[in-house]
Image: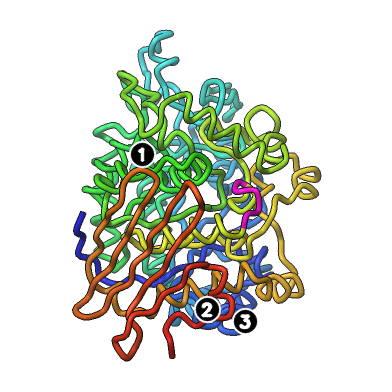
Amino acid sequence: MDTAQAREGVQLIAYADRLGGSLAQLREILDGPMAGLFTGVHILPFFTPFDGADAGFDPMDHAAVDPRLGTWDDVRALGAEYTLMVDLIVNHVSADSAEFRDVVARGDESPHAGMFLTMDDVYPLGATEADLVGIYRPRPGLPFAVLTLGRRKRLVWTTFTSQQIDLNLANPTARAYLDRVLTTLAQGGVSMVRLDAVGYAIKSAGTSSFMTPQTFGFIDELTARARELGVQVLVEIHAHFERQIAIGSAVDRVYDFALPPLLLHSLSTGDAAPLHRWLDVRPANAVTVLDTHDGIGVIDVGPDQMGDGRPGLLTPDQVHDLVEGIHERSGGSSRKATGWAASNLDVYQVNCTYYDALGRDDRAYLIARAVQFFTPGIPQVYYVGLLAGGNDMDLLARSGVGRDINRHSYTRAEIDSDLARPVVAALSGLIRFRNTHPAFAGECTVGGGGDRLTLTWTEGAHTAALDVAFATKEATLTWTGPDGTARTCTDLRELATVDPSGS
């Protein structure tokens, strides 16, 4: 695979309240102890309220910055320095939003009545059993909550939780709301929006209501509007790998959610064949991640759970072994946060930090990050992953929310201490290398076979290559220095003290 790729620097994913405490303090950390590490930042929801039922993904007011975190001026200040990504939550709003509270109080007399989706909106003549069981949902059960709107009970569409009320995006009021939010984000200095849960946004009778042709049509319309405002679009979808390929061809950016589980598989088994298969077909316009605010997706590499059950990049047995391996290497802590063991159930993710998913093996962790950075796309590093964080069992015990295991709130002292740890210092060196070496402005070639993977970037006389032997967890980094001479590192942990630029 030869992929022309303009250089894209490494970006950070972070909650302002959990890494710094506010928007201004997040910027201070980026400019201070993390100076030079990131060219962009994805700030997870900072809207009112940032600490709702789903950690900000259930906004009461999606166009307002929670005053406890700062103001739009703080957001614009970050956008002036960094490529700024923000979530556009397209599927739902909080049950406590002013609009929905008015509908609860006044029913059909509310001017916002058509803004929210009910079962009748999709199935005006009623639904059969086949219709209902055919709806794809990332939680157990049906996506409805029985709520009283005005004087009558309705089946209101709630894809995720009863605190997150789905928008009726066929209604002009809902579309006007979404356009107002998008315009506000653009005016706030945002250069890219992540379309949160967009795969579920359009519901259509007779379909799964997930990534249907109507959904693609909606994404096209929203992307066109975003581009008018000077904003790029990143689509967030957990689905069969062939759907990711199709989505990638239609949008600015798509997540590479297959890479994290495939790397875990390769590092635990020595088998790099599924990873090679993916690297041969994956979208080049991807945002690469190993971890995010959610869990580690496994649906992205398994057989298709919809339609004809097409084979995945891993077999069902391999997916089972992958999940059990994470639980084992994390000392069983991930099992306590995944599936039926915790609320906010995800049927397609394992809740665990990536560092714990690898058994806190520094060498394996740095290899995984190196492969991420050498894979074409925009690399993003989650704040807990940046600091090689372990599972936060105390937070899990307090909240009972599985994904909180990977959402630690760092004090400034913890940040300073973790940045000095050898594994984090080595990761920081790797990030700076990815940001500065001129080879990453060129083309990437994939080689190797069996347990080996080689990723080589070339731009003129500049080269940077990563060779990994997964069976032995050995990696060799070679590159051209500023004077044109070849340089080599055979242990990525050395990057804690060695400047790979050679300067």
Q: Name the residue under label 2.
A: 73
The residue type indicated by label 2 comes to Asp
The residue type indicated by label 1 comes to Pro
Chain part drawn in magenta: 357-361
| Residue displayed at 43% across by 65% down | 476
Considering the image in quadrants, where does the N terminus appear? bottom left
The residue type indicated by label 3 comes to Pro
Q: Can residue 334 be seen in this view?
A: yes
Q: Earlier in the sequence, mark 1 or mark 2?
A: 2
* Residue placed most toward the observer, 255 or 267: 267
* Relative horizontal placement of residue 340, taking residue 250 as reference (left or right): right
Point out the frontmost of discs 3 and 1. Answer: 1
Q: Is mark 2 on a helix, strand or loop?
A: helix
* Relative horizontal placement of residue 289, taking residue 404 as reference (left or right): left
* Relative horizontal placement of residue 52, taking residue 447 as reference (left or right): right
Point out the frontmost of discs 1 and 2. Answer: 1
**Label 1 packing within 10 angstroms: few (<14), some (14-19), many (20+):** some
Q: Is residue 358 above or below residue 491?
A: above
Q: Is mark 1 on a helix, strand or loop?
A: helix
Whole-angstrom CA distance, mark 1 to mark 2, is 46 Å
Q: Name the residue under label 3.
A: 33
Q: Mark 1 points at which residue?
A: 274
**Label 2 packing within 10 angstroms: few (<14), some (14-19), many (20+):** some
Q: In this view, does 1 lie above or below 496?
A: above
